[in-house]
Amino acid sequence: VTGVQTCALPISSQGFPGQGFPSEDFSQGESSQGQSQSEDDDQTGEQSSEDEDETGEQSSDGNQTETRTISLDCTELDIENVTASGFESDPSDYHPPGDAIDGDLTTWWSHNGNDPWIEISLVESNPVCGVAVTWNKGDERDYSFEIGISENGNNFEKVFEGTNDNESTEQEIYPFDQEVNGKYIKLTITDTSSNDGWTSIQEIDALGLTEP
């Protein structure tokens, strides 16, 4: 993606001022791939859980995604649906993709497959300015990820590639170089410092321009 965006609002750990998403406008998307490890397994068990794998050898180097800014005209866009590559399906530890758009920071989507992704579809196609993510365990993990935009849900254009701020549990905003029209937004995690490959997102929001 090329071009320079004229913008006014700096990224901050406080996130973007928005109204949140209605929890009734989502489905749980694709069925779980059936993880063999529970995110919250007893730490005394033989299988590693999401909670205990943070004691592994991998650690953060404190790097932060390049600072960019986003237009004040960009607001939260309405989400119609959400799907994902899989999710933690243990009945006692259930974290489907719908938990990432319910406006509740006590719930989250989680998956420990290879290159897991979560995809939101908007109510209608809009110019998209960026994506806001609240990472679960965001102050403990490094995530590398890509964001793609599509009009039809099949052909995605990569519009962002970066990493999270390992020191933050607050909402993080990832602005694009310029607005990109689209209805489908896919975030793919390409690397995680979780020893067992866990990815967890409390909330994902789309920021864009709407008709006056």
Image: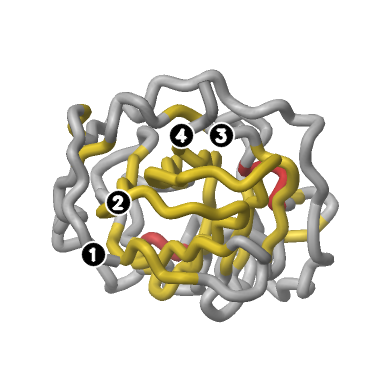
> Which mark is in front, 3 or 1?
1
Residue 157 location (% of width, % of height): 46, 70
Q: Are marks 3 and 4 in contact (CB under 8 Å)?
A: no
Q: Is residue 4 left or right of residue 80?
A: left
| Residue type for callout 4 | Leu
> Which mark is in front, 2 or 3?
2
Q: Earlier in the sequence, mark 3 or mark 4?
A: 3
- Residue at 67%, 33% (x, y): give it: 102
Q: Where is mark 3, residue-wise?
A: 77
Q: Residues within 10 Å of mark 4 (few under 14, many from 20)?
A: some
Q: Are marks 1 and 2 in contact (CB under 8 Å)?
A: yes
Q: Where is mark 1, residue-wise?
A: 2
How far apart, in angstroms, are the residues tagged by discs 2 and 4? 12 Å
Mark on residue 64?
A: none
| Residue type for callout 1 | Thr
Q: Where is mark 4, residue-wise?
A: 209
Q: Is residue 154 left or right of residue 158?
A: right
| Residue type for callout 3 | Leu
